Amino acid sequence: MEIHVYDTYVIAHDGHTMHFDVFTSEKNDQKAITYAKQWLASIGEGDAVVSSKECRFCHSQKAPDDVTESINQRGYFIYKMEGC
């Protein structure tokens, strides 16, 4: 499966920066933002601001099996990097 990667930086409620990627099966900026918001809400950061400024398309690539499985189940996969 080809996935689309959205590089995302948001400010957490305590002021630190969270950096993560949103992986989706379709290149759709608004869906990527929605998925970022869903994930943030699930970890208690639902008030974080996420817009096209914080969540930007980066590139497309082939997905490993675990990412494909998550996307098929939820529509997205979150790749956590700094501050998550």
Image (cartoon, rainbow, N blue to C red):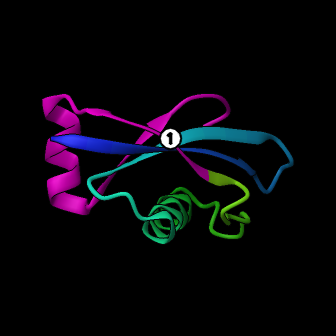
Is residue 42 inside the magenta stretch? no
- Please tell me which residue is depicted at 71% across the width and 70% down the height of the picture: 47
Across and down, in percent, residue 70 comes to 21, 48
- Please tell me which residue is depicted at 60% across the width and 61% down the height of the picture: 44
**Could you tell whether 24 is left or right of 21 in the image?**
left
**Could you tell whether 80 is left or right of 54 in the image?**
left
Task: State the extent of the magenta-drawn residues as a range.
Answer: 56-84
**Residue designated by label 1:** 21
Residues 20 and 59: in front is 59
Across and down, in percent, residue 25 comes to 26, 53
Q: Tag 1: Cα neighbours inside 10 Å, few (<14), some, or many (≥20)?
A: many
- Please tell me which residue is depicted at 64% across the width and 37% down the height of the picture: 19
Task: Name the image quarter holding residue 62.
Answer: top left
Is residue 75 inside the magenta stretch? yes
Across and down, in percent, residue 14 comes to 83, 50
Residues 60 and 45: in front is 60
Residues 28 and 67: in front is 28
Q: Amino acid at mark 1?
A: Asp
- Please tell me which residue is depicted at 15% across the width and 41% down the height of the picture: 1
Q: Tag 1's secondary structure?
A: strand
